[in-house]
């Protein structure tokens, strides 16, 4: 009987594999065989070919409808699904491959240039090179399937009409497949990273959960007590439960727990219930969920929501456009390890702090000519696309395009963490420097091309840039953003910070700008900025640490009042920064009181 069943199953699986093969063909997915270019002694251009049935068989697909016919096809799905799926990104990772061949290569922390040398040495061995090409060839066709198959239609997030967060993560696939496999009113309990409620790349999954399920619980752990061994103690993960069907208008949530036993008491009347319409109000683009711990969190968020989100265009007010310049891996061919004539330094996130720059020396320098050409290329393509059909491309002067590195720019660290001393680390970057992707910067100009030709519109003045930097560097904005992020500061989250658009006419504007200028303009690189804002030169900046601490405390007190916070609410925000010294927090709270008494203006 066992042999008969195996024979029937083999025949059925062969047919099902053929059907899956037809789906790959319908989706126009091709197999990409990695190659090696002997002349360049480097990875070559992949050879594309149609996906074969043998490629499908190599995937060993699990055909749910066949294996669980009674449950899937006759009952409409499972009653209950409980799972703790893998939490891995589905893409080739060269360091992971190399580690298996040479454990001396660190998975993390290795300098990109050093790693490239070690990889090149390994690939000199023909057998290792063959394994490497086979390894690379495993991913593209299956990744393309996950991106285009109807059953995984919620894997790629779309924000403002653009696809974002396109990495395929196995836990994201499991969440959607669990939804697919449930019968109507079926229930799911799944353990996944906290990115399910915060990451931009999971936006479509959140939309699916809100619109097509009733979320019955979102319980977040921080791994401080090593619930999962071998996982970073700062890592956060979630026990998510939902019932298929209906819609979610609100749901119980709890965050930052450390003991598994706490889950037995959830949900309770004391737990926060988060309303979905508040999520839409505070995170209209990302739908990321703020980590509310108490009603005071909700009240502060509602006060902040009265101000426009940073990414929203407000007529007659300054605006901010953000972007990254050079990728530390993809653009590493431009990096030089020693300064020389014609080279400009590359700034990275670790080189700045709040109202400060130059915390470390540059590691790399770039040829201004080559770097400028690489930055211009995508801009020119965009403009040409906009001009297509306008019959005026020949009259367009591309030399008028200005690049950010010639201007002062707001910059913030992209690599950070919600549990760091400060998560939103913001300052102003000097002129004449390029930036790596760990430092996201503002763009001083936006390109507008219409049928009449070319125009450029400045998005902010130097004084407004200082005001924006001060607001973003405040404890209030940091408190808000660290409730959304885990380890990386995506610019879309920054766009969702509610920020008062202070301008010259506002009484708070000048006091904030003057303090920010004294904190930032402390070296000759900022003499131009000092002159533009009326400070004179960097010699009038403040370098005394005690005086700098006073100015920062006053800024925090003034900005907390600007948001309409009470003393209790501001004091609560300060308690959420455990790594910030008590001296700093007390100074900020005293400054808040002095603003209230009219002692700080």
Image: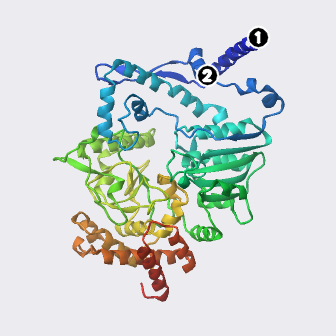
Q: Is residue 509 left or right of residue 528?
A: right
Q: Quadrant of the C terminus?
A: bottom left
Q: Quadrant of the N terminus?
A: top right
Question: In the rendering, at what x and y percent does residue 215 appear?
Answer: 72, 51
Q: Residue at x 48, y 84 (%)?
A: 593
Residue denoted by label 2 = 60
Q: Is residue 167 left or right of residue 174?
A: left
Q: Is residue 208 left or right of residue 501?
A: right
Q: Mark 2 or mark 1: name the one nearer the start of the chain.
A: 1
Q: Residue at x 28, y 40 (%)?
A: 334
- What is the number of the mark on residue 281? none
Q: Relative to residue 558, is residue 221 depicted above or below?
A: above
Asked if one can make out residue 509 in the rendered structure from this viewpoint, the answer is no
Q: Is residue 309 left or right of residue 17?
A: left
Of circles 2 and 1, the one toward us is: 1
Residue denoted by label 1 = 4
- Mark 2 Cα shell of 10 Å, populated few (<14), some (14-19), many (≥20): few
Considering the numbered disc 2 on the image, is that residue within a helix, a strand or a loop?
A: loop
- Mark 1 Cα shell of 10 Å, populated few (<14), some (14-19), many (≥20): few
Please identify the quarter of the rendering in which residue 543 is found. bottom left
Asked if one can make out residue 580 in the rendered structure from this viewpoint, the answer is yes
Mark 2 and mark 1 residues within 8 Å of each other at the beta carbon: no
Q: Residue at x 67, y 44 (%)?
A: 190
Relative depth, front residue between 32 and 483: 483
Considering the numbered disc 1 on the image, is that residue within a helix, a strand or a loop?
A: helix
Question: In the rendering, at what x and y percent does residue 523 appear?
Answer: 23, 66
Question: In the rendering, at what x and y percent does residue 406 appear?
Answer: 28, 55
């Amino acid at each position: 009987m066992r042999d008969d069943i195996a024979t029937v199953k083999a025949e059925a699986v062969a047919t099902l594999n053929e059907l899956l093969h037809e789906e790959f063909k319908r989706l126009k997915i091709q197999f990409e065989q990695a190659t090696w270019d002997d002349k360049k002694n480097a990875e070559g251009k992949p050879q594309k070919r149609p996906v074969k049935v043998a490629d499908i068989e190599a995937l060993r697909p699990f055909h749910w409808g066949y294996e669980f016919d009674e449950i899937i096809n006759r009952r409409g799905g499972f009653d209950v699904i409980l799972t703790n799926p893998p939490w891995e990104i589905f893409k080739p990772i060269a360091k992971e491959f190399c580690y298996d061949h040479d454990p001396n290569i660190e998975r993390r922390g290795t300098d990109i240039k050093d790693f490239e040398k070690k990889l090149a040495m390994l690939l000199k061995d023909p057998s290792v090179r063959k394994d490497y090409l086979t390894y690379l060839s495993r991913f593209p066709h299956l990744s393309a399937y996950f991106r285009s198959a109807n059953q995984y239609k919620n894997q790629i997030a779309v924000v403002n009409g653009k696809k974002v967060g396109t990495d395929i993560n196995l836990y994201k696939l499991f969440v959607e497949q669990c939804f697919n496999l449930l019968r109507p009113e079926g229930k799911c309990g799944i353990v996944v990273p906290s990115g399910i409620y915060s990451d931009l790349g999971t936006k479509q999954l959140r939309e699916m959960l809100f619109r097509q399920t009733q979320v019955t619980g979102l319980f977040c752990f921080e791994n401080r007590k090593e619930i999962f061994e071998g996982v970073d103690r700062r890592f956060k993960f979630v026990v998510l439960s939902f019932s298929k069907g209906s819609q979610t208008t609100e749901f119980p949530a709890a965050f930052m727990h450390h003991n598994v036993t706490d889950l037995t008491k959830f949900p309770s009347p004391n737990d926060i219930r988060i309303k979905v319409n508040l999520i839409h109000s505070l995170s209209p683009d990302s739908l990321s969920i703020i980590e509310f711990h108490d009603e005071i969190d909700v009240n502060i968020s509602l006060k902040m929501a009265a101000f426009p989100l940073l990414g929203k265009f407000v007529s007659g007010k300054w605006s901010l456009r953000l972007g990254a310049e050079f990728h530390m891996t993809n653009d590493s061919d431009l990096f030089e390890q020693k300064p020389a004539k014609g080279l400009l330094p590359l700034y990275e996130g670790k080189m700045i702090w709040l109202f400060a720059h130059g915390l470390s020396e540059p590691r790399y320098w770039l040829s201004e000519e080559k770097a400028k050409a690489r930055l211009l290329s995508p801009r020119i393509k965009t403009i040409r696309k906009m001009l297509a059909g306008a019959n005026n491309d020949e009259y367009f002067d591309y030399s008028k395009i200005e690049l950010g590195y010639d201007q002062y720019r707001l910059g913030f660290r992209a690599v950070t963490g919600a549990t760091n001393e400060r998560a939103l680390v913001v300052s102003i970057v000097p002129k004449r420097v390029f930036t790596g992707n760990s430092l996201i910067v503002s763009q001083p100009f936006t390109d507008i091309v219409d049928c009449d030709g070319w125009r450029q519109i400045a998005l902010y003045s130097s004084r407004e840039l200082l005001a924006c930097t001060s607001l973003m560097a405040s404890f209030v904005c940091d408190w808000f953003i660290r409730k959304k992020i885990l380890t990386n500061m995506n610019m879309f989250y920054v766009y969702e910070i509610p920020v008062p658009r202070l301008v010259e006419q506002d009484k708070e504007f000048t006091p904030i700008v003057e303090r920010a200028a004294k904190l930032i303009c402390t070296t000759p690189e900022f003499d131009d900025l000092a002159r533009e804002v009326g400070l004179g030169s960097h010699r009038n900046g403040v370098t005394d640490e005690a005086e700098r601490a006073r100015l920062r405390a006053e800024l925090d007190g003034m900005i907390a009042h600007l948001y309409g916070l009470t003393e209790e609410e501001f004091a609560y925000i300060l308690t959420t920064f455990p790594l910030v010294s008590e001296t700093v927090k007390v100074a900020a709270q005293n400054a808040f009181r002095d603003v209230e008494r009219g002692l700080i203006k």
